[in-house]
Image (cartoon, grey):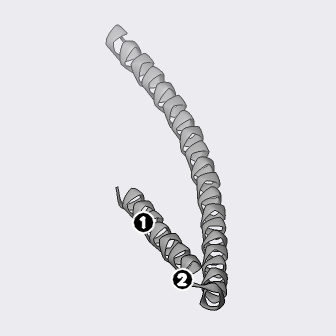
Amino acid sequence: MDLTQIVLLLMIVVLGTTLTLVGVQLFFILREAERSLRKTNLLLDDFKVLSINLSQGSENLRSLVANFSLKNGSLLMSLATVFGLVRTFLAKSKKSQKDG
């Protein structure tokens, strides 16, 4: 073997080792990214359940105020209307944040 063949063989070994190490590191990075995405997905699922429960609670409160105001005057009905408008505004704001 002459000097050129030895240098080429050495370069092939060095490049192969480097590419192998880069591949292993890329595998670890992708595995960590997958774990992070799974945790984020679980967090978003929990937030979804929380927002649904909060929405149902506010709807129950609104119907309670509406029923009470039917018996006790228009002031409480106007408060229920304001509450409904605020709830609608917050829902639109949340939707626009989700879209944006």
Q: Residue at x 46, y 20 (%)?
A: 14
What's the amino acid at mark 1? Phe
Q: Residue at x 41, y 61 (%)?
A: 93
Sequence order check, earlier mark of 1 and 2: 2
**On screen, 6 above or below 46?**
above
Image quarter hosting the N terminus: top left
The foreground one among 1 and 41 is 41
Residue 75, how many percent across, how many down? Answer: 55, 77
Quick one: label 2, few (<14), some, or many (20+) residues within 10 Å? Answer: few
Query: Number of marks in the image?
Result: 2
The residue mark sitting in front, 1 or 2, is 2
**On screen, 56 above or below 11?**
below
Of helix, strand and loop, which one carries label 2? Answer: helix
Image quarter hosting the C terminus: bottom left
The residue beneath circle 1 is 89
Which image quadrant for residue 56? bottom right
The residue beneath circle 2 is 74
The numbered disc on residue 57 is none
